Amino acid sequence: MRSAVIFTMVVGLIATVALPAYAAFRPEAETKTLQQAAAADAQSLVVASDATVAQLDRSSYSATTSEEIDKKKAAEAAAERARQVAAAARTTSTSSSANSTNSTPIDLSMTAPGSGEVRWPIQGFTKGRGLWDSGYHQGVDLLASCGTPLFAAAAGVVRVSQESFGGYGVAVTIDHVINGQRVSTLYGHMTYGSRQVQSGQTVEAGQLIGVVGSTGSSTACHLHFEVHINNAVVDPWAWLEQNAG
């Protein structure tokens, strides 16, 4: 009898634990239908009053129709043509700039005035420093505007014609034979690209050889003119005044 009572109590305890609490004790009045349960879990969408319309950006999308593909190809071709035109314009501009820097327009018909064996190498100048003035100065400075024509002081053969000749900058030297004496004249600080003669070339008295500049060791436009007789430095100003005509 005692064993039967204990067995009955154990079985009842197991049954009580195995059943859900809400199933065992839910009142009949609280049972919900499927529709009621669905209504309670329904989702809703709330749109704020300040919401704005955003336009989609299609720049990252590829063309999908033949019309769009044609438009895209036409745009790419136009961009390529514009690039080529811009490149050509830059090349032309660079070339023009280089030409204007390295050359100077010169009237090649000009000749020095006078008819003597020795001519003045420049006209319309102002005399500047002379021989040995302000230290080591082996010539005379004849001041004139950049671009003023320069002429060979006498007939002879060009020995030097360089764009960079030491402190003289762009310079020309000419060897002459005058009255049996070996005379050399130098024309310094000429404009870049203005030289009209080359080394070894024979020139006549008064022939155009270049234009005034300010190259080399120079601070203003002028002609630095030197005269050497039998390899000795002489006063070029006195030599010109004595011989040029």
Image (cartoon, helix red, strand yellow):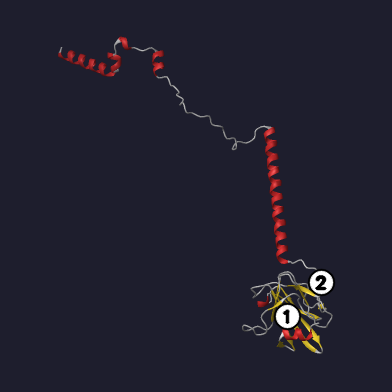
In the rendered image, the vertical position of residue 171 relative to residue 18, given as above or below: below
Q: Quadrant of the C terminus?
A: bottom right
Of tags 2 and 1, which is closer to the observer?
2
Residue 53 placement, left or right of 127: left
Q: Earlier in the sequence, mark 2 or mark 1?
A: 2
Which SS class for mark 1? strand
| Residue plotted at (76% across, 84% down) | 241
Q: Can you identify the residue that label 2 sits on?
A: 110
Residue 186: assigned label: 1
Q: Please state which amino acid type lies under the numbered disc 1.
A: Leu
The local crowd at label 2, few if under 14, some if 14 to 19, many if 20 or more residues have their Cα within 10 Å, is few
Quadrant in which residue 36 is drawn = top left
In the rendered image, the vertical position of residue 180 relative to residue 168, given as above or below: below
Q: Quadrant of the N terminus?
A: top left
Where does the image place residue 118, in percent across and percent down from the top left? 80, 82
The local crowd at label 1, few if under 14, some if 14 to 19, many if 20 or more residues have their Cα within 10 Å, is many
Residue 7 placement, left or right of 58: left
In the rendered image, the vertical position of residue 6 relative to residue 214, given as above or below: above
Which SS class for mark 2? loop
Quadrant in which residue 95 is drawn = bottom right
